[in-house]
Amino acid sequence: MNEESPASLIQRNKQGWRMDKESQSLPEVYRSIKVPTSGSSFKKFLAFVGPGYLVAVGYMDPGNWATSIAGGSQFGYTLLSVILISNLMAILLQALAGKLGIVTGRDLAQACRDHYSKPVAMALWVICELAIAACDLAEVIGSAIALQLLFGIPLIYGVLITAVDVLLVLFLQNKGFKFIEVLVIVLIVTIGGCFAIELVLAKPNMGEIARGFIPNSQIITNPGMLYIAIGILGATVMPHNLYLHSSIVQTRAFENTELGKRQAIKFATWDSTIALFFALFINAAILILSAATFHQAGMTDVAELNDAYKFLTPLLGTAAGSILFGVALLASGQNSTLTGTLAGQIVMEGFLRIRLAPWLRRLITRLIAIIPAVIVTALYGESGTVDLLILSQVILSLQLSFAVVPLVQFTSDKQKMGVFANKPWMKWLAWFVTVIIIVLNGFLLYGIFFG
């Protein structure tokens, strides 16, 4: 790494950072993708397409499916408005994460390490590692359930098979970052295609769907509906995605000028916004499918992935319904595997300045998820894995506030962000969303622990 002059360090201190930027985020792919300096805006935008889709993966991982299925089976289309609102919150926060990385050249983990005292930074690192392990646990269980549903592989063997994806991730990282982005987009399209066909087979009521996107007072007055709504809202924004996005936007070699950064922020925001609308479609599709089949048939207690798979065939009148559900679940689990690896690497390097080989980092994270999954599956079977899925979402909810607060704090700081600091209206909106997330997660955790 090239050392900077004392004058450069003084300038950085004036910008509100305690120390020089010690290393690049994801150095093996840092600024590795060229951005054209001439041509149309659309051509430049295409150079930024990709990171948003890696981020969107976290909003459609297996851990979120059960909540949407339960919401649709119990309350029909009513909670579609909650999915929409939570998605809008996600769009705002991911835009801020992208801006932080582009403007400061730091990912969120590096920024936290620089800004906070060492004990605080270490505490944030531990909490974030727990969240990544929890998310990985949801991916392991989701993939194992999909393998069981599609191929009859026992859950415990399916959990062990997921360890093999370490080799897949290592292979892809050697191919280049753009290759990973393309594969993720292909898997997202696969998930979306599966649910599009499912919706055609289910023939949902379009009028009720439209009304479902309009907020209903019943969401507040009905305790059962409120609880599931809080679950959807509270667990939608994945904390590790904020660390991930602030890093991978730096894979683009944009001009390091005010104009270049403004263009990069604009195109990166468009990329993540469009990608998150794909996530909105998929999450809404899961709830709509559940409403059009289970709720319509009076089956209001369907909340588990296994039950959803089993009941879709008789309700849709074709085995294709269950198969497509299983394929989408498997694609979702494998997609999350790729982004989880990158997020883990970013967090460890950013907070600790420790670099591990990608395969070793993935293996460690996978073992942390696989060991409890194997033990619980062996002792308690399918019911135990469902409880583990719930536990993973609780841990994610606990960590979320510790990622959102620093993000809003840094991007609102004029000394750190300069002319790119959040405008007053954006600052207040971001803090308002942060407070909502903190309060809702508090209610969610209180409900889980105290009924």
Image (cartoon, rainbow, N blue to C red):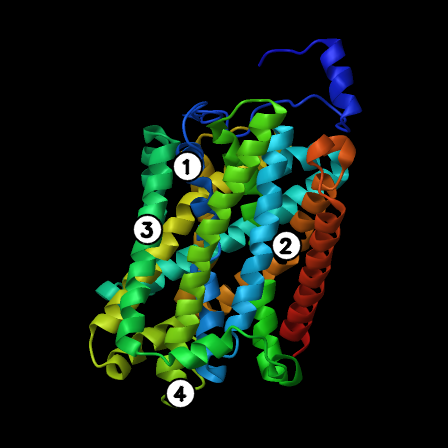
Q: Secondary structure at mark 3?
A: helix
Q: Earlier in the sequence, mark 2 or mark 1?
A: 1
Cα gap from disc 3 to disc 4, whole angstroms: 30 Å
Q: Which residue is mark 4?
A: 299
In the figure, is residue 329 to the left or right of 121?
A: left
Q: Which residue is mark 2?
A: 400
Q: Which residue is mark 1?
A: 42
- The reply to whether dot 4 and dot 2 touch (C-beta < 8 Å) is no
Q: Which residue is mark 3?
A: 187
Q: Earlier in the sequence, mark 4 or mark 1?
A: 1
Name the spot of residue 334 as percent of width and height, x first: 36, 51
In front: label 3 or label 2 = 3
Name the spot of residue 293 as percent of width and height, x first: 35, 82
Q: Quadrant of the N terminus?
A: top right
- The reply to whether dot 4 and dot 1 touch (C-beta < 8 Å) is no
Along the line of sight, the residue nearer the viewer: 125 or 202: 202
